Image (cartoon, helix red, strand yellow):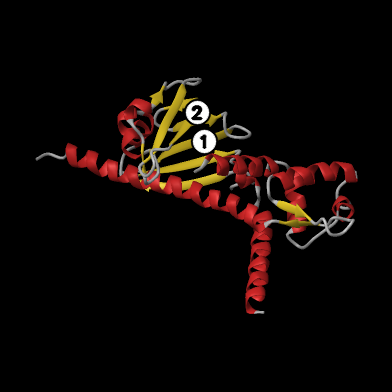
Amino acid sequence: MTALATDELSLSFAALADPTRRAILTRLSAGEATVGQLAEPFALTQQAISKHLKVLERAGLISRSRAAQARPCRIEPAGLELAADWVDRHRQLWHERYNRLDQHLAALQADDSPT
Amino acid sequence: MTQPGEFTYCRTHHASREVLFDCMTQPEHLTRFWGPDGTTTPLDGITVDLRPGGAFETVMVSLSDGSQFTMRAVFLEVSRPERLVWTEPDVEGGMVTTITFTDLGDGRTEVVTHQTNVPFMYAGPETRKGFETSLRRFGDYIAGLTAG
């Protein structure tokens, strides 16, 4: 994994570690929304929501339109894919590790068996 | 039950709990299997100070480009042959890995790897489902563009 990808992932993971930001992503996965619309279901000010959006935007998980004054937010599939790939790789790492352990165990048992 | 932020992996091996525990904690064994495919884990890069508070470090070296990835962990619990727990303070939030060895009574051992504070696993099932929907919609959108 390159250093750049690792940094991006750190940002994604830090962004995803917060329950409010996860809820915002869940909401955005249903479609675009403005800061005002996102603030509604949470007992939070628009200012607090904006802070969360900045973290998500920096992590590449959302983007904000510059075309309209309300600057609606949308989810960024590429950023999410990067994180989802990491999950697959993580499972794969343990899978391969235990496969190799099995091979190692077989070698140990072959050594132990009487000749 | 796996909660958001958690990861569980379950395997059964044909060996005793003691052998498996030793494989997971002795450098001469770890060097044979620890790194993922396409890497090596050289013996001189493995540190195992097998006691609570002791260091557990491995350096995995890529076979293709020689790049290295170091895992730095600290043991939290060392209970041979039932349980092994370590934490990786460098990973965001302090990821904790618990390996449980259960004797199945027929020469086999079930090994359960359970991790908490796994960064991306915080995206719970409902969020991931949302991501999938979003990704599918994005795919449809791209397909629409290329068709038009």
Residue farthest to the left?
A115
* Distance between mark 2 and mark 1 Cα atoms: 10 Å
**As rendered, which of A37 and A5 lies closer to the eye?**
A5
Tell me the tag on residue B97: 1
Which residue type does callout 2 highlight? Answer: Ala
| Residue farthest to the front, as pictured | A67
Residue at 38%, 45% (x, y): give it. Answer: A98
Q: Is residue A114 left or right of residue B42?
A: left
A28 over B90 or under it: above or below: below
| Numbered badge on residue A32 | none
Please tell me which residue lies in front, A63 or B82.
Answer: A63
- Numbered disc 1: secondary structure: strand
Q: Chain of mark 1?
A: B
> Relative to B88, is A69 above or below?
below
Q: Which residue was labeled with disc 2?
A: B73
The amino acid sitting under disc 1 is: Thr
Q: Which residue, as the protein is rendered here, is positioned at the far bottom? A: B148
Q: Is residue B8 left or right of residue A23?
A: left
Where B42 sits versus B109, above or below?
Answer: above
Q: Secondary structure at mark 2?
A: strand
Asked whether residue B106 appears in the rendered view, the answer is: no
Instruction: Determine whether label 2 and label 1 are within 8 Å by CB.
Output: yes
Residue under the image location 40 percent in, 28 percent down? B80
Taking the spot 41% from the left edge, 32% from the top edge, the residue there is B59
